[in-house]
Image (cartoon, rainbow, N blue to C red):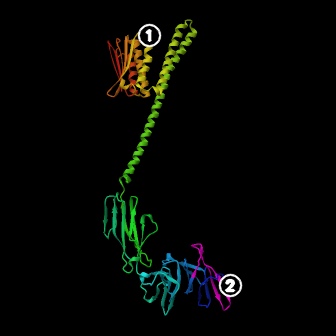
Amino acid sequence: MRLPDNYVTNLYTDHKGRVWILGYQSVSIVDFGVRTIHSFDIYDFARHTFYSMLFDICEVQGRYYLASYGGGVVVLDSAYRLVRNLSVQNNLTAITTAKIIPYKDSLLFVTSNHGLSVVNLSKNDSVQNFYESDGLHSDNLEEYSGAIRNNIIYVGGVDGITVIDPARLPAVLPPPPIYIRQVTTESRNSSQDTSNLLLSALDIPENVLQTTIYLSAVDYQNPTRSLLQYRVKEQEGDWINIGTRDILPLTGISPGKYTLQFRSANKDGLWSSRPVELYLHFLPKWYQTFWFKLLVIIFIAGLFYTFYLYRMRQIWKQQQIRKDIASDLHDDIGSTLNTVKIFTHLARRDQQKEEYLYRIEESLTQASAGLRDLIWVLDDSGDTVKDLAERIKRFAMPVTQVKEISFDCSVASAIMEMTVSKPVKRNLLLIAKETINNSIKYSGCQHIQVSITDVKDKLLMSIRDDGHGFDTQDTVSGNGLRNIQNRARQIGFTASITSSSKGTLIEIQG
């Protein structure tokens, strides 16, 4: 008969007279009557390893209980199959168990290197724990120091032996009641506290840096061994161990409403079923409030909407400029080219071509000037009042010199570099050209004066001649005046026209 392991930790005889040989990582059952041996090992699926250092074994109610070094108590059924494992999760004092002493098939006394556990088999394996503070000679109990005689338990180890009468063990007490004895709040410059034992709700100001909750679990039998846990009800998470500490500091908590639940356990690990609740409302800072966030959203939405309107206005302005350019090309260049076409046709039929050729040249000159003006309007480098005045001079000087009319154009020095938009400079140029043409053709003037100034932060262009004037109510004259007024209205300006026998004054202001 061969053993799988020469490292033997203990021997045990079961009710059938078979000998259990416990090894380092194996169990062998020897029946000397028939000279057979059955060996097996026990696998720990939780730790993915084999149970080892099996120090002790006992048989109770058809099950076998083995003490494992580092594995707690291993439970096997009559067919040697693993049924369960008792460990610290089941409230044992430690996972390094040494000795198992059965008592009347109802209790198991389990020694360890950290106290004594009493497992009640008749009450779903509930556990009571005892330590040096409860009367043991030491918490460090040796693996081979334990026995039962006349229903008295003996456990030994460092510093002596403890004698236990199981009949006199205290009953398992209910979990101790828990109270919230104090809550303190600390800010940068001050601190506040409350000691209301009936406190159930509290508002935490927005300037608080830390909130501390002080707890008390009232256990008169063993007050130093009461265990505490807490959780946040809204988060539906697991309970968080505080241990034997009676203080819970809270820092960095986001604004909101929280329900803290607390529960306590006695020294045997029995937890209270009805937790104590504390409702805390952490008030938000001003920039964390709903109204502030709503205002920020509205502000951002307003910015986007303003940008959208600005962009739409820019697109509309561009479309309007294109429309005006198309209208100018149609009315000015288009009509000029049509005139050239007519004169060309007449020149081909008539022998007197000189007159028609002169008209064609004149029309092409006008078309060229109109095209140059259009290009100037579109040029971004000529958007100042000074550039506008230079353009008016360039148009007026040649025609007035031919007619022997003196011409003068002046700009106030304060507004020479003022920028004007393309629609403004386009319409002001066209108004000036039409007005100067009318003065040259119809007024019989000797002098034309153009001045551009600012009056009350508004641009004012004045065009004056010393001609004989005209009747502003005349139908023909009225059409020209309406054109000037319409162009001024398009750019948000006002047009004022005054005419008498001493001359005409046209003022465009905006």
Residue 21 is left or right of residue 255, and the answer is right
Name of the residue lying farthest toward the front = 159
Q: Pinpoint residue 205: horizontal percent, then vertical percent.
A: 33, 59
Residue under pointer 2: 2
Residue 168, label in figure: none
Residue 353 is left or right of residue 167, and the answer is right
Specify whether residue 339 is painted magenta.
no
* Highlighted magenta segment, given as a residue range: 25-54
Q: Pinpoint residue 489: horizontal percent, then vertical percent.
A: 38, 26
Depth check: give the residue in front, 139 or 202: 139
Q: Is residue 202 visible?
A: no
Q: In the picture, residue 182 is in which quadrant?
A: bottom left
Structural distance between the alpha carbons of marks 2 and 1: 137 Å
Task: Tell me if mark 1 has few (under 14), some (14-19) or many (20+) residues whose alpha carbon lies within 10 angstroms of its own.
Answer: few
Q: Amino acid at mark 2?
A: Arg
Quadrant where the N terminus is found in the figure: bottom right
Q: Amino acid at mark 1?
A: Val
Q: In the picture, residue 129 is in which quadrant?
A: bottom left
Q: Is residue 290 visible?
A: yes
Which mark's residue is nearer the viewer, 2 or 1?
A: 2
Quadrant where the C terminus is found in the figure: top left
Helix, strand or loop at disc 2? loop
Residue under pointer 1: 402
Q: In the picture, residue 4 is in which quadrant?
A: bottom right
In primary-sequence order, the first of circles 2 and 1 is: 2
